[in-house]
Amino acid sequence: MKIDLSNNSVLITGSTGGIGKALCHSFAKANAKVTLHFNKQKDTAKNLINSLPGDGHSLIQADLSNSNEIKDMVGSISDLNIVINNAALVEQIDINKMSYNDWMHYWRKTLDVNLLGPANLTFLCANRMKVNGGGKFINISSRGAFRGEPKAPAYGSSKSALNSFGQSMALALARDNIFFYTIAPGFVETDRVKNIINDEIRAQSPLNRVAKPEEVAQTALWLASSGNDFLTGSIIDVNGASYFR
Ligand SMILES: NC(=O)c1ccc[n+]([C@@H]2O[C@H](COP(=O)([O-])OP(=O)(O)OC[C@H]3O[C@@H](n4cnc5c(N)ncnc54)[C@H](OP(=O)(O)O)[C@@H]3O)[C@@H](O)[C@H]2O)c1
């Protein structure tokens, strides 16, 4: 099925990450105008935008833990009808080996980026979409929201909260023609995790592998295409049958 997103403008947060890059390529190939968000990796973002097919794409920087930077970012984007909340922070910790101060800092930092960032971005973008006839949000969650993340509890919790956030917004904003979809991948073969993916992890799936970033991107592209309004509030597992909930 060839998806054509001509006349659509998509903001992809965390475009410089493994899944972000695949999302940018998929949406650009489908003729969408892509705004590539990055935080620290400016050179990666520049290379990425130069590698995309089509034109009209743009780059934008913001630290998503900073609500003012989010506001400035949204204010500077001219067209916007699809937002992919993809950026996230994952830090591994050991609850048995850290101070209370480090613990508090770890939680605040993770929730600021992974939960408050998408919540603030959604508020501002949804207000724009309301006056422009509607739009779509695709939130990238994780299998860890359901399975638990003992070494990254704030990350797992932020993703559970993101699931609930998407469902709540689906209820709150459907009347404005604004739809919410959540994708919950298991492990995805990106630079960040490639060193920890081993045979045991691959064997969690009967396909004996982890997901490719393109498989997450393809799911997002399909959700963004027309005809999926009634899927609003859905959480789609992309985990190769490695975990059923
Ligand atoms: N990879 C997996 O196995 C996997 C599995 C399940 C779910 N996911 C989810 O899929 C999404 C993408 O994962 P990934 O592995 O592709 O990520 P990644 O390679 O680690 O990239 C993370 C992205 O988030 C951005 N980011 C981090 N902190 C930020 C901040 N404070 N403000 C703004 N942007 C910030 C980074 O921007 P800069 O680099 O420019 O700083 C980068 O673009 C995440 O939501 C993740 O939770 C991934």
Image (spheres, rainbow, N blue to C red):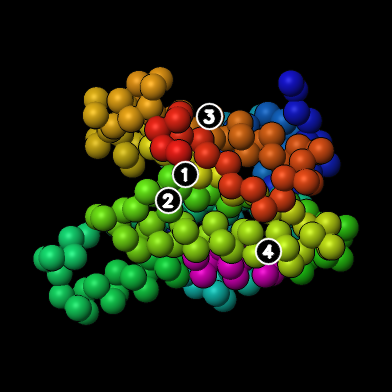
Q: Amino acid at mark 1?
A: Arg
Residue 147: image location, x then y, percent: 37, 48
Local crowd at mark 2 within 10 Å, few (<14), some, or many (≥20)? Answer: some
Tag 3 residue: 214
Q: Give the mark, 2 or 3, whose residue is nearer the N terminus.
A: 2
Q: Which mark is residue 245?
A: 1
Q: CA distance from mark 2 to mark 3?
A: 23 Å
Mark 4 vs mark 3: which is more N-terminal? Answer: 4
Residue type marked 4: Met
Q: Is residue 35 above or below residue 174?
A: above
- In terms of secondary structure, where does tag 3 sit? helix
Q: For the magenta stretch, what is the residue range? A: 115-126
Give how far apart the Cα atoms at labels 3 and 1 are.
23 Å
Q: Quadrant of residue 166?
A: bottom right
> Label 2, on which residue?
146
Of residues 244 and 15, the one nearer the viewer is 244
Q: Extreme left residue here?
A: 97
Along the viewing direction, whichever of 74 and 194 lies nearer the viewer: 194
Label 4 SS: helix
- Tell me the kind of residue under disc 3: Glu
Q: Which residue is mark 4?
A: 169
Comparing labels 4 and 3, the label whose residue is closer to the camera: 4
Could you tell me which secondary element the residue under label 2 belongs to? helix
Q: Quadrant of the N terminus?
A: top right
The alpha-carbon separation of the residues under discs 4 and 3 comes to 27 Å
Kind of residue indicated by mark 2:
Phe
Instruction: Compute the Cα span from label 4 to label 2.
Output: 20 Å
Mark toward the start of the polypeptide (4 vs 1):
4
Q: Is residue 45 visible?
A: no
Q: Is residue 117 visible?
A: yes
In the image, which disc is placed on residue 184? Answer: none
